[in-house]
Amino acid sequence: MQSPRSTSAATTQLASTSAAISNLPFPPFFLFPSQNPLQPGQINVTEEEYETMMLATIEEVWARYPSIILEIWFDGGENNQKMNDLIAKYQPQAIATDGTEAPNVARLVGRESGFAPYPVWSTDAALAQDGSGDPNGRFFVPAEADTPVALQDAWFWKPTTAYRPLSELKAVYRNTVGANSNLELGVLPDNTGNIPSDQFAVLAALGAYIKSCHSPEAAISSTSGVGVSIRLDLNEVTMINRVILREDLSKGQIVQGFRVDVLPDGGYDPTPVFAAEGTAIGNKRILYFQSGPLPAKSIIVTATELYPGQTSANWLTVAAYSPCADE
């Protein structure tokens, strides 16, 4: 007989913690065991009874709201075939973070700091395995980095809640989205269900930074194509300090090593100037030049290592950016 767990009659704890699911007609919920002493109205249940209640509760909610949940997060909880069957039946479109059955699975890339340890690969050797991934893994299981907007790893609002400085959140964005990871930024509704104005101001400032510094509209120029290398020609010599690179992941994450060079005068001097290098690109890599801004008329990105058996890269985006005033 397995040891009993204690749970309340309601069996759920409600908590709105993510902007990604704020459009749902119900709040996200957690169903979990407690090791605390029994409180009035609570009873002990066995592992089998707990699992039965858990699955019944989840099935009831998912059946009422089918095919609308964006993400199902296995935060150390039950993750078995019964759960996979419920996902396939009621929420087949949902991403299952640390899920154990393809196709819509993702994995956590690290702890809740919001800084992904580069390089980050979109493939891995197994499902439900956290970390940076495996460049030669056979499963497509993209990385996700979760972190709250509040200080001290706080995921729930209090009247005294303080928020992370904008400079830190900018770095979080560059080191998650800009390092081939999905960023799940936890926001904290207050006790009225609204986002407090001071928190809203932080989020709005972060959005403005992303738009002004890293959006496609902010690029000086961009291109796409297929090949071992790709060249981006600018209209005139321009000071460039970073590029945004993207692979077409519908054809796989192919690039396993690359370098970026610039031609400063449009080709009159054919000697390229080294700017930066890296390993993983994936969905997006925001890459700053190692020596700072460089004058560039052309930018050449070359794949120096490819997935075994591949002969060319699929460049979805190669975009050049000048120094941003909001950095």
Image: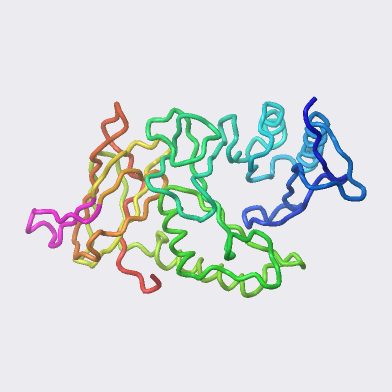
Which residue is painted at 25% across and 59% down in the image?
290
In the picture, residue 90 is in which quadrant? top right
Give x and y (percent) for residue 212.
Answer: 42, 68
Which residue is painted at 23% across and 67% down in the image?
239
The image's colouring method is rainbow
In the picture, residue 293 is in which quadrant? bottom left
39 sits left or right of 51 in the view? right
Quadrant occupied by the C terminus? bottom left
Front residue of 226 and 241: 241
Give x and y (percent) for residue 132.
Answer: 44, 41
Query: Would residue 275 be counted in the magenta stretch?
Result: yes
Which residue is painted at 80% across and 38% down in the image?
5
Q: Is residue 77 above or below residue 198?
A: above
Quadrant occupied by the N terminus? top right
Give x and y (percent) for residue 120.
Answer: 41, 44
2 sits left or right of 318 in the view? right
Q: Which residues are the magenta region?
A: 260-276
In the rendered image, the residue lying farthest to the right is 41
Query: Would residue 107 be counted in the magenta stretch?
Result: no
Q: How many marks?
A: 0
235 sits left or right of 175 in the view? left
Give x and y (percent) for residue 76.
Answer: 64, 40
